[in-house]
Amino acid sequence: MEPNEVALDNCLPGGDGVSEVLQPQSLPGRQMLPIARRVTLGLALAWLALVATLGWWMSQRVVADHLDSLASSAQYETITTARVMDRLFTEMVSVAHMVAGQAEVIQLAIRYRTDPPSAVALTRQQRAVQFARDPLVRKVGGFMNALARDLGYARIYMNNMSYDTVTASNWAEPDSIVGMIYSGRSYLIDALRDGTGASFGIARLNKTPSYFVASRIVDSNDVPQGSVTAKFDAPNMASYLTGQHIALIVNRQGRVITTSSDRFMLRNVAALLPSGTVLPPDNEEEPGEPMDVRAIAGSAHADQWLIDGRPYLLRHQPLAGTQYQLLTLASLEQLVPMRRQHFSTAGLVAAFGLALILLFDRIAAQLAERRLRAERDREMALSQAAKRELTIKVRERTAELAESNLSLKAEMDRRHLLEAKLRQSLDSVNEALVLQQDFVATVSHEFRGPLAVIAAAADNLMASAAEGSDKIRRRIDKIGRTVKRMSMLIENVLASDRLSAGLVPFVKVEVFDLNEILHTAKAELDDNAARRVAFIHDDAAMVKGDRVLLEIAVQNLIQNALKYSALTMPVTVRLSTDQDFAFVNVTDQGTGVALGDRDFIFMKYFRASGKSASGSGLGLYISREIAQQNGGELILAASDAAGSTFCLSLPLERSTGLSQEQEPRNSQPAGLEP
């Protein structure tokens, strides 16, 4: 085989067949390896996505169920504990009332109603010795001591009107509070004034946080004689806060006064209280060291908080008859290891699935390698056969190429001849178009004269036949309408011819009020059309453009509305403006424009299908071209079975000077006169 024959083979028309012989088609075995890799990668990604999605969904469900269980448990524990606390506080009030109503207690209170002036100078011990000499003091103190032991109270004691402790349940003990003056204590003041008083505070002697409930002692005439106080230490009350969650009793300042967890005791958690229930600190007790309390953002459940960095689920319940709130905190710290366990399980499942997928990939790769070796052997045999056929193919294609070159040369000569004839035909068409334009312009000028004479004659006949028969007047009116229609047709044909030639159709540009166009259009209507067309004017709408051509555009829109609506249906022409544009909307009450015709109604010579009205199909085309040449636009604003609205928009001219006129650079269009 010659070298030039091999080079020419690339240019042969059928060279693809030779390439197929030289390069055997890709066989399935050759494609199995990359396909297997892609399938394995796809399976691995799909498996990981499936495990991640299901793992996340199942973890969310388990966590949500756990949170619901915690919330239910915390709510139940809150309600149960609140009932226990309510009974304890109710019992303290009842005990204080019961002791204050004892006859011996009333008798003792009357006996020591107020301290003598000399008592202030005595020490507590001296006042205690004086009180303890009275057998009634010891008897009432013994009764209080027995009652306090039975009920588990820290202390029960009686104060007179001077807030001096006359007797107490520990009157005989070394740390007795008999003789202690508790002036300024709010619970004693409230009891003497209102009958009952309650407070929480830190005891001055043993520094123990305690609850105090006081009841007023009155004589037979309901005159206050003193008060009885039942004291319950907070650590003893905390023993009632049993449960699996942390319980807090919080005062109105947010201070924890009793808790089942020591780290919360006497700390401030005001942020956990409902909005509007927190009071400012009073002068009796400190508000407590504030804890770091923050709401957990984006949690599925409400009332999830971080307290000193630990997550909790909160439930709260007001305690009846007190100013305290019971808060229950369910720890959420177990959620982190729970989620970690879920992720670990999902990871193990994903790893097991990936191992199976990789095993499958290994088996598929071995099968593909075996198939590939067999295909390579087959390709070697095909290559040898291709080499033997190559010489024959190249010689045949070389002969075919020579024959094709001769045919190509003949085809090129034929096309050159056709191009020359085509140029001659185009020159003839252009000459015919020029002659047509000249003919149209000449005929239009020739028609204008007779039409003007006919129009004047019709006007004179109408004037002279003012009292003639209606039949004559109708014929004269028909002549006038025909003349106007032919005049409008001539103007549209001339403008269309001018626009088709690519020339600027302006004769004179000036600034004028669009209201003048509407007045002119109204004046040119015949009597029947004038009765149907309603003109709605606006304030001055100054625009810059060709007055004559814009009059043609508005007349076309009005005539179009009159033609495509019933003879008795009205037509509305409305002028409106906004900041930048003036709008002339022409609305008829015809049958509307069909959906299939809306894209073609502005095309030259287009007539809507199924319409019986006469016309040239130039009106809308000419009107839109005039609007665009004057810087505006003409659109079909609305159309339905009740009618159509065409909107002509033109930019407003903001200058207030005199009207400006300018001559166009092109020569005046033939057939158009100002």
Image (cartoon, rainbow, N blue to C red):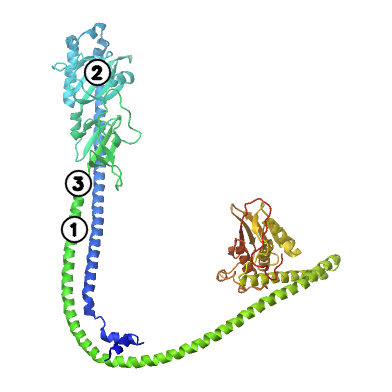
Q: Which residue is mark 2?
A: 102
* Image quarter (top left, top right, bottom left or bottom right) of the N terminus: bottom left
**Figure check: 417 above or below 170:** below
Q: Nearer the viewer, mark 1 or mark 2?
A: 1
Q: CA distance from mark 3 to mark 1?
A: 20 Å
Label 1: how many residues lie within 10 Å, few (<14), some (14-19) or many (20+)? some
Q: Which residue is mark 1?
A: 347
Q: Is residue 598 above or below residue 407?
A: above
Q: Which kind of residue does numbered mark 3 sit on? A: Gln
* Earlier residue among tags 3 and 1: 3
Binning the other alpha carbons within 10 Å of mark 3 as few (below 14), some (14 to 19) or many (20 upward) gives: few
**Residue 183 horizontal side relative to residue 673, left or right:** left
- Res 261 seen here: yes
- At numbered mark 1, what does the secondary structure look like: helix, strand or loop? helix
Of tags 3 and 2, the one toward the viewer is: 3
Asked whether residue 645 is in view, the answer is: no
Residue contact between numbered discs 3 and 1, judged by CB atoms under 8 Å:
no
**Between 636 and 336, the one nearer to me in the picture:** 636
Who's the residue at 23% across and 13% down the image?
108
Residue 194's label in the rendered image is none
Q: Quadrant of residue 182?
A: top left
Q: Amino acid at mark 1?
A: Gly
Residue 445 higher or lower than 167, as above or below: below
| Residue on which disc 3 sits | 334
Instruction: Name the outermost residue toward the left.
Output: 174
Quadrant containing the C terminus is bottom right
Q: Nearer the viewer, residue 138 or 576?
A: 576
Q: Secondary structure at mark 2?
A: loop
